[in-house]
Each structure stands twice: as C-alpha cells, then as structure tokens.
Image (cartoon, helix red, strand yellow):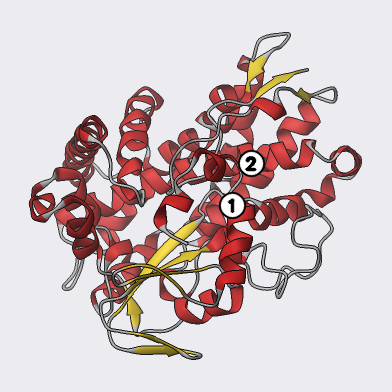
Amino acid sequence: MNLADFSSPAFFDNPYPIYERLRQAGDLVPIGPSLMMTGRYDLIEALLHDRRMGKAYMPSVIARYGPLAVEQPVFRAISRMFLMANPPEHTRLRTLLMHSFNARRIEDLSGDMHRQAASLIEAMPATGPVDLMAAYCTPLPLRIICRLLDVPLADGQVLGESAAALVRAFDLAPLDEAGLADANKGAVTLESYFDRLLRARRRQPGDDLLSALIVATSGEGGLSDEEIVANMLLLFVAGHETTSNMLGNALIHLYRDPAQWQQLRSDPSLTQGAVVEAMRFDSSVQMVARTALSPVRVGDVAVETGTTVFMLLGAANRDPAKFDNPDRYDLRRENHGRLISFSAGIHHCLGARLATATLQIALDKLLSSFPNLTITGLDDLRWHRRHSLRGVASLMANY
C-alpha cells in the first residue's frame, strides 16, 4: 500500500474497504521512508499510551512542504498549540488548561446548548427542503464555542470561515498554493482576533473560558499571552469543526437504517448510545500521527527513532478483532470498550465531554422537533476531500 491509496476519490467517499486492506496487510505497514501506517485497534491504543511515541510537528511539515514551511503563519500557529507538544511542556500546558476547561463549566453550558438548538430549529423555513449542515450541524457547535468564549455570534461566523481554511493545514496531503494562502490568512485572522480579545479580557474579565484561563494561569509558571492565543485557536477550531461533521455523520448512518431511526424516535433514552456508536462507526476524526522519539518494537517490527506512524482511528473502530460485526451501526451496542475516537493517552481530546454533550442535545432536539424528518440524497453525498476531518458538504432534508 502507499499514500496514493488514501487520497483517491473512492477513499474519501468510503474509506472502510481500504482500511480493511490495511489491517490485512499487517500490524505496521511501511508506506514511505520513515513512514508507517496501522489500522489495528489494540496496536493503536498501545502506541497512543506509549511515551516513546510523541509529536514531531515541524519536522513533519518540513518533510511535506520544504524548509521554508517554518515561516508560514499557519504552521507556526499550529506548532504553538499544546496538542503538538511533548512532556514536560505538554503536561504543563494541559494541566493549566484543564483548570478552566472543566466539567462544571461544560455542565453550566447545558441550558445554552438547548436554547441555541431550539433557536436554530425555529429559524428554519416552515417547509423543506433545508441543508442540515448549513442550517443546524455547523452553526450549533459554532454558537456553543462562541458562548464558551463569549464571542459575538457575528464575529463567530467570520472566524468560522477562517477556522475552516486553517483546519485544512492538518491534512496529510500538502495544500496547493491557493489552499496554503487561505490557511495562512485564516491563521492570521484568528490570531489577531484572539490577541485583541485577550487584551480586552485582561482589562475587563467576564464569565467565560478565556477570562477564567487568565485568572487560573496568572501566577508563576502560567501561560504566556502567546500560549493563550494559540490554544484559544485550538479550542475554537476543534470545538466546532469536529462536532459539526460528527453530527452530520451520525444523522446519515442513523437514517440509513430505518429500524434504528425509528427506535431512537420512539425511545430518546437511546440517544447516548446512538452518539457513542456514531463516533465509533464513522468518526469525524479519522487519523492521528505519532513519531518514535526512541526505538520502539511492535511484535516483530522495529520502529526506529524518527519514524512517523499514522494511526487510522477510523480503521481501528471497525477492527473485527475488537468489535463484533463492526461494519454494522448498532445504537444498542454494548461492547464499545474504550473508544479511541477522541485519541487516547496524554493527548486524549480535552473537549471530548463538550463534544459528546453537544451531539446528544443536538440529535435529541432535532428528532423531537421534526417527527416527519426525512433525509434525502444519501446516494449522492459530497464527502470532503480531506484527511483531517470526515464529513459531508451538505445534507438535505425535508420535514
């Protein structure tokens, strides 16, 4: 197998047959110089918890874009995110962020999540058709992250466009000149906005995550302004792009199985199971990468220092060695075990609780509001051609 197998139109439309080939090819499959790939659940979970496997972000960027990539604003912005750090720096940054981005703050958002979902539903036309991605799946997580940061919705919509451009820089395949220019513009726009917002919150704190972060990290060893801005970018980008795509994917696979669609309609208590199963079955985040910081042996395969392993979470979530009948969406599935859709180990997604809560409320509110909801065009879906996030460009429905 080679990287071209993972960039074809057929792959983006349905990656799972290729994932099956990858698992059959072995535990760790070489795909290029110092590059390997795996789709095995147990192996990925073990490697994600192995401290010898870490992040080497800038070297990976230079390998794809050349040495001048270090001067590109988008790569510089991403490199400052705690997501790209290794211990002890990662430990310091994550600990400080967790003090403010905690369970209580997310629970306090629950009422606002319900209100924002209701507001978007009320704004839909009296009769369909409607694009659920544009009218609901995308704006709802965006509104929630704006509320978390106390960012005006009008600003959030502009920033959302910048975030969509920036997130393309996470793709495995290099961006073309126009795409890189858009990503750079998005990064500069976001950094400039959050730098101004940080200065405003220092002058006049509010009841929001950024203000709480300023207070929590104001002592010795706290976050610098540059670190705060970089990680506000991360929270903003990850806080809505991943969730909006995941919500669309969940609706697609639920509706494709009429029996389970009806079960969920009849019994809203199944919503949590429906969301968890959707995250297993077709997660918006399909891949993470780790680089060997020292030699690692996996079975009979030696992973030398500097080798990058692409871990296909989407393939792991369909691994028959872990899940019974893995290619069936089953909202009553009981053996989820420890899902790795939010990664695992020290880099487990900080926003997992927020994303899960948003998805449950969004799905429950949509189905309860439209008892005759029908999703159309499932045979003609336009899946995004990108590795960083799996989702559709639009999702048409009637009600």
Question: Circle 1 — which element?
Answer: loop
Name which residue lies at 40% across and 26% down.
Answer: 153
In which image quadrant can residue 228 be found?
bottom left
Can residue 80 be seen in this snapshot? no
Which percent across, then down, holds residue 327?
75, 56
Can residue 282 be seen in this snapshot? yes
Q: Is residue 121 left or right of residue 236?
A: right
Name the amino acid type tagged 2: Asn
Residue count near mark 2 (Cα–Cα under 10 Å), binned few <14, some 14–19, many ≥20? many
In which image quadrant can residue 149 be found?
top left
Name which residue lies at 58% across and 72% down.
Answer: 40
Which percent across, then down, holds residue 174?
28, 46
Residue 70 vs residue 91, the one in the foreground:
70
Question: Circle 2 — which element?
Answer: helix
Residue count near mark 1 (Cα–Cα under 10 Å), binned few <14, some 14–19, many ≥20? many
When the figure is inspected, residue 221 is found, relative to residue 230, above or below; the finding is below
Residue at the front extreme, as displayed: 1
When the figure is inspected, residue 151 is found, relative to residue 14, above or below; the finding is above
Which percent across, then down, holds residue 104?
52, 59
Name the amino acid type tagged 1: Ser
**Residue that label 2 marks:** 249
Residue 399 vs residue 145, the one in the foreground:
399
Residue at the top extreme, as displayed: 126
When the figure is inspected, residue 209 is found, relative to residue 40, above or below; the finding is above
Which percent across, then down, holds residue 396?
66, 21
Mark 1 and mark 2 residues within 8 Å of each other at the beta carbon? yes
Name which residue lies at 51% across and 38% down.
Answer: 9
**Residue that label 1 marks:** 283
